[in-house]
Image (cartoon, grey):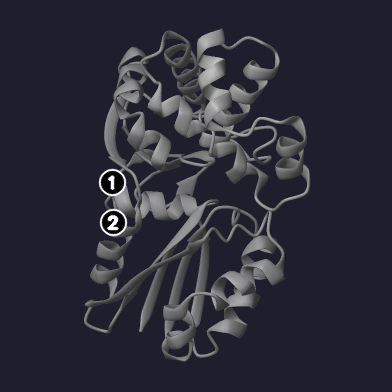
Amino acid sequence: MILIVDSGATKSDWIALDKKGNQLFFTQTLGLSPEVLTREVIEDRLANNFELSKNAKDVANLYFYGAGCGTERMRKFLGSIFGDYFPNAKIEVKEDTYAAIYSTTKIGHQGIVCILGTGSNCSYYDGNQLFQKVTSLGYILMDDGSGNFFGRKLLRDYYFHKMPQALGIKFAHEYNLEADVIKENLFKQPNPNTYLATFARFLIENKDHPYCKGVIDKGLQQFVNNYIMQFELATKVPVHFVGSIAHFLSEELKIVIERNDLILGVIRQRPIEGLMEFHRDTI
């Protein structure tokens, strides 16, 4: 059995294939980012999934693409956990950027591949190798244009009284915005980046409001400026996107892409289907 995993900060998609490439099952767990989760939490999330528990010993190959796996230390940390949980599996752990690349760009083709989901990232793929100009310092300092970026912006504007009054009332009606609740989630609960990203739903649902339009446009433009334009070939190769923010704000993203003379490529909400096709071709 082959297990293919696309793991974001919020959730992880798991697809199992047999030796002929036929799908055996699809399941989900919560996100498994090693940067923000302990070994105990990750092990618990694996153990609480029925399909994974039932089939753990039958897995021969595990291909894991995950948020927070950009350093060798984090890849080894996750690899150790998976090695214990899937005792008969050959394990390969890569950062989630590779999932985005394999699901949008054909081998041998150039492109810039961006992640705009709970977090954000951007890489250049020359058809064989991946190159990054920006080393991520995590959600607190970076992640421009992401779900947690927009969530942080909404909370700040609400508390600094920069959000239009009527919209602020609506925002407060949909979320618990008590300071103690927010600080509890940010400083004492796991996955503070995922918590921040939950507020992005409000921005998407109200994206036609002038305030929201401005926040979205500025956030996406900031991502273009700080990430995409780092590459000299930015305006000469397709720019692909994966992630929920890219998907739900695709029209707004297209406007920003066109304004910056970029070539829009593929937009996928989730890379798992493209990953499945990629690994089927390599079986």
Observer able to see residue 232: no
**Which of 28/169 is in front?**
169
- What's the amino acid at mark 2? Gly
Q: Quadrant of residue 176?
A: top right
> x%, y% of residue 145?
51, 28
Q: Earlier in the sequence, mark 2 or mark 1?
A: 1
Seen in the image, is 113 located left or right of residue 138?
left
Q: Position of residue 235 (x, y in %)?
A: 35, 23
Q: Image point 57% across, 61% down: which residue? A: 32
Amino acid under label 1? Answer: His
Q: Which label number is shown at residue 109?
A: 1
Name the element at disc 2.
Answer: helix
Identify which residue, 152 or 100, lies in the foreground: 152
Query: Between tags 2 and 1, which lies in front?
Result: 2
Label 1: few (<14), some (14–19) or many (≥20) C-alpha neighbours in 10 Å = few
Residue at 60 percent across and 23 percent down: it is 153
Residue picked out by circle 2: 274
**Gap in Å between the C-alphas at discs 2 and 1?**
15 Å
Quadrant occupied by the N terminus: bottom left
